[in-house]
Amino acid sequence: MPGWKQEAIRLRLQEGLTWGELVARFKDRFPGLNYEQVRKKLSDVVRRSPEYRDAQVKPTEGKRTEEWNAAKGEYTSDRLIEICEQDEITPELILKAHGLKPGLWEVINYRNTYWHSQVKGGKRLVMYHSRLTAKPLARGIDLDEIARHYAQMDRKYRRPEIAVKP
């Protein structure tokens, strides 16, 4: 692959340049092409690269719903999550996968379904759909918050001032 193609892929994927910025950088390389033709050439090179395809395979992104039922005091989350097949599926793991801190929530119910999917290039993915219903704990203890609290405390000893009688 010529050096300019690798450079275009790097600038787009790693440095986040827009298509317009890429065209401005590479337009001199293609003197007979107009703006749209250069843009198409660059986007074809970038989108066909393995780096681009790998960056697009993100099963945890997509449709998700969250709901709070005030009458029951329950939170419901419905989303695609990422779990390794070797992992032991526990309520704590499910809470973390839904972005909740296990010390602050109690799992009421969860249901996971999975299926196999294939993406371009023959890569096989295991996709998990998870629905979680949880309640906040009345007295949830978050050790991270306790550690932050103690880290912010002023622990310097100050000798109390004693009033001297004349």
Image: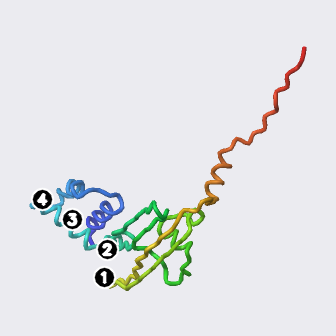
Label 4's element? loop
- Between disc 3 and disc 1, the foreground one is 1
Label 2's element? helix
Separation of residues labelled 2 and 1 (CA atoms)? 8 Å
Q: Residue at x 46, y 62 (%)?
A: 71
Q: Which amino acid, by three-letter code, is at mark 4?
A: Pro
- Return the residue at label 2: 53
- Return the residue at label 1: 121
Q: Are marks 3 and 1 in contact (CB under 8 Å)?
A: no
Mark 3 or mark 1: name the one nearer the start of the chain.
3
Q: Which amino acid, by three-letter code, is at mark 2?
A: Arg
Q: Are marks 3 and 4 in contact (CB under 8 Å)?
A: no
- Between disc 1 and disc 4, the foreground one is 1
| Whole-percent x, y for residue 63 in the image | 33, 69
Q: Residues within 10 Å of mark 3 (few under 14, many from 20)?
A: many
Separation of residues labelled 2 and 3 (CA atoms)? 15 Å
| Whole-percent x, y for residue 138 in the image | 60, 60
Mark 2 or mark 3: name the one nearer the start of the chain.
3
Q: Quadrant of the C terminus?
A: top right
Separation of residues labelled 1 and 4 (CA atoms)? 33 Å
Label annotation for residue 42: 3
| Whole-percent x, y for residue 117 in the image | 34, 83
Label annotation for residue 31: 4
